[in-house]
Each structure stands twice: as C-alpha cells, then as structure tokens.
Image (tube, grey):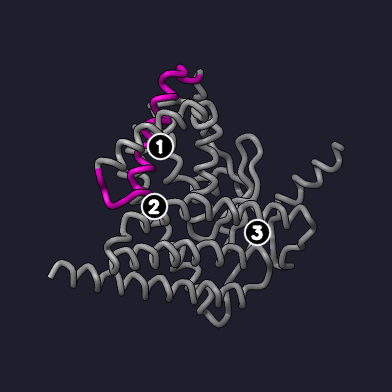
Amino acid sequence: MEKAEASSINRYFYAVVLYFFLWIILTYPFSIQEWEAGTAIAFTASLLSYRELSVSGLKNIKRIGILLFWYLPVFIRELIKANLHVAGLVLNPKMPIKPGFVKIKTNLKSPVARVWLANSITLTPGTLSVDIEDQYIYIHWITVGSTDIEHASEEIAGSFEKILEVMFR
Amino acid sequence: MVDLILGWTGVVLVFIGVFFLFLGSLGVFRLPDLFNRLQAGTKATTLGVVSTTIGVGLIAKGWLVFSLALAIFLLMTNPISSHALGRASYRAGVKPYKGTNPDLYAEKIKKESDQK
C-alpha cells in the first residue's frame, strides 16, 4: 500500500541519521573530532535535501534492518546460484540456452518495492528485467521454463516478493 | 592467528571473484546475442567484483569498512545499469537471437507504437 508520506520532521531526522552514518563510514578511522564535524554537516545537509531523500522517513530504518538480516542472506544465496548457472551454461560446449522474453505479474504496490523486485530479479539465475509497466515486469529469461504469467511469476519472483511485501508494508 | 585466517579468507575470496570474472568474460565472448551477453556480464561482474573487493578488505584491514561500502553501492547500482542497457538497446532496434521464442516484449512495443 502506498500510504501518505511521513511528516517533514520525521523525514528530516531520517536524513540526519542516514547522512551521519554515511559520514562515519567514509571517515573510517573513528575519532571524536570527525563525529562532531559529521553531526554539524549531517544537520545542515539534511536541511537542504530531506525532501528528495525519502517519502516514508524513519520507517526506512526498520526496512534496512529487514534488508540486512532477512533479504541479504536470501539474495546472496540466489546470486551465487545465478553465477553457478551462468558458469554451467558457458562451460558447456553445447550451450543449452533457450532464451525468451516473458512477462510476470507482481502484487507489490509501492514503486520503490517494484524497483527492488526488478533489481533482485536481474541478479537471480538466468533472468534480466528489461522493462516495467504498472504491475507487469518484462523479463529476458535465458532458459525459459514457463510462458504462463502465474507460473513464471512464482518461479522468478516468488522468494523475493514475500520478503519485499513485509519490508514495504 | 586471527590475522592469518582473515588474510587467507581474503585471498580465497579474491580467487573466487577472479574465477567468476573470467567465466563472465568467457560468457560475453560465447553467448549469441546482446541480451544473453548482458546476463552473463551482470551476474559475473556483480559477484566477482563484490567478492574481490571484500577479499581485498580482509587482506588490508584498514580498508575493510570502505570495501564493504563499495560492495553495497555496487550491488545497488549494477542491476540498474544492465536494465538500462537492455531496455535501451531493445528499443533502439537490436534484434534478439533468432532462437528467442516467446517474445512478449516485442508485442508490447508494437502495441505502444500502434497507439501513437
């Protein structure tokens, strides 16, 4: 569901937290002086850019938590599988490819969630998302399994869609 | 001791990364058309580069935080660039390999141009 956006103050503080964290990472050998400068800069820079940064504000921090502890392990497993799949295709002398463009349907409503889904699909075995139109994603599939929308959606997007649904609730 | 283990883990990660990068370039060389090549290119470069960067971070520990940040940015931007390349080249008229069987995307583009 695309809800109304969070209040300005909420979005502002989300920007502050994010910028401060980024500053800490980029000035890695930690020191108090850097942190002081970082605080000042985070507050100023957020003032200029919080409108463009996020719509849902501090809720994104919960999302980042889900991202790190639930999404990332699944994603890494899929990425390794994708690479072994490509390796198998490339090293096989006959190259058993059967490419095609298929169309899948997603139930995700928020545009950001759809972008995440499309990106995840690109990095999973044998699929590359080419275009997106409302709730349909067009996918180049290197070994087409099923051209039926329902089956293809389940096979390609199934595991990620569940996680993203919780993440962007 | 811990240093040694981390260092060797780093070396192993770098080797895995290099191996997949090699397979990716082989894929770009062998696969028949742009879209298939793009697939091999994206997947192999993502895992290859991420694994190599993290490996380097483990070998030179002063850089570990930076290399993790670099890996995250790569993971977020790499699929976007390959999506953009695929979409743009299809629309610019790059023909897919002749064995490409269901081509639902062609139907969509045809429909769009009919509407204009």
Q: Which chain carries label 3?
A: A
Q: In this view, does B53 lie above or below B25?
A: above
Which of disc 1 and disc 3 is earlier in sequence?
A: 1
Q: Mark 1 lies on which chain?
A: A
Q: Which residue is drawn at 55% across and 74% down?
A: B25
**Mark nearer the viewer, 3 or 1:** 1
Q: Nearer the viewer, residue A147 or A126?
A: A126
Q: Mark 2 lies on which chain?
A: B
Which residue is labeled 2 in the image?
Answer: B69
- Same-chain check, marks 3 and 2: no
Q: Do the residues labelled 2 and 1 touch (CB within 8 Å)?
A: no
SS of the residue under disc 3 = strand
Q: Which of A90 and A24 is in front in this view?
A: A24
SS of the residue under disc 1 = helix
> Please, what is the three-letter code of the amino acid marked with disc 1?
Tyr
Which residue is labeled 3 in the image?
Answer: A100
Q: Residue at x 32, y 54 (%)?
A: B65
Magenta residues (range)? A5-31
Q: State the image quarter where residue A161 is shown.
A: top left
Left or right, residue B37 beside residue A108: right
Q: Are marks 3 and 2 in contact (CB under 8 Å)?
A: no
SS of the residue under disc 2 = helix
Label 3, label 1: how far apart the Cα atoms are: 42 Å
Label 3, label 2: how far apart the Cα atoms are: 35 Å
Work out which quarter of the rendered image holds the C terminus of chain A and state it: top left
Which residue is labeled 1 in the image?
Answer: A19
Q: In this view, does A16 lie above or below B54?
A: above
